Image (cartoon, grey):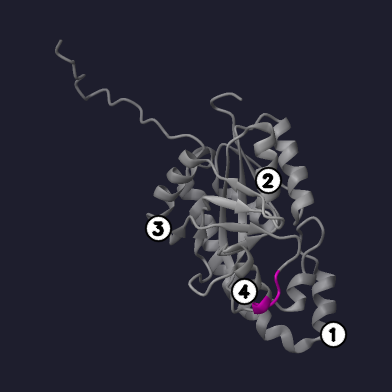
Amino acid sequence: MQQDSPAGIVTGLQLEARIARRVVEGAVTVCAGPGPARAREAAEWLAAQGVGGLVSFGMAAGLVAELGAGVVIVPATVLSETGTEFVTDLGWRERLLERLRTELVCTDAPLVTVRQPLATYLEKVALWARTQAIAADMESAAIAAVARRVRLPFTAVRVICDPVDFPLPPAALAAVDAKGRLNLPGLLRALWQRPRQIWRLGELARLSGLARRSMHAAGRLAGPRFGLTATVPAPDPHRPIAHTRR
């Protein structure tokens, strides 16, 4: 790994990947689709390209009442569904928290990765009771496992989209295909079957807008290479050089 190697960013949705590509310099972003298996595939590809570290970036579901849409999770630990714990890189995490907290509400509380979306309040609360994680996604633990195996630094930046008390409408689950793209036929079919869920889709669009704004800000504030290494300021040519007296 070279000192100036780019950061490797993995997302589950193409929407998340577009945001990362738009605002983050010095990074390679890959979206293979939602879920642990596809995230692992993307992370392994990035590792083979020689990236300097791996990032899980995107949205998450809130598992506790204190987290509203747009709150950013930069977790100290990421848990798998089987209970395996992954610790994110300390220096990288602290840099990100310092930068992101200048504009965003952030926490370093635990994040848990699941295989299927959490559609109901009861599913979210039950997961919190079992793991004590405050948010859930579908990719981070798989990316962390690759980073551990190939000895790369790892971090995650996840933004709350659906809070704990917001049930996901079935149309939202049908609206994403296996590669993380918008599945318009699936969305329309689900709406045709249950047209009354359209109001919840409207509320989800509002919450998603809050999450997207936080994701844009997080990518911008993270800095080049997503904050993988501390930026050393260039020397000021007009500043006198301090000499140590012996």
Q: Which mark is residue 125?
A: 4
Residue appearing at x 31%, y 25% in the figure: 235
Is residue 135 visible in this depiction of the protein?
Answer: yes
Q: Which residue is mark 1?
A: 193
The mark lying in front, picked from 3 and 4, is 4
How far separated are the C-alphas under marks 1 and 4?
Answer: 28 Å
Which SS type dominates the magenta stretch? loop
Residue appearing at x 71%, y 55% in the figure: 12
What crowding class fits label 3: few (fewer than 14 Cα within 10 Å), some (14-19), or many (20 or more)? Answer: few
The mark lying in front, picked from 1 and 2, is 2
Q: Which residue is mark 3?
A: 103
Q: Which mark is residue 143?
A: 2
Magenta region: 118-122
Looking at the image, residue 1 lies above or below residue 44: above
Are discs 3 and 4 less than 8 Å apart at CB? no
Instruction: Name, please, the residue furthest toward the bottom.
Output: 196
The secondary structure type at the circle numbered 3 is loop
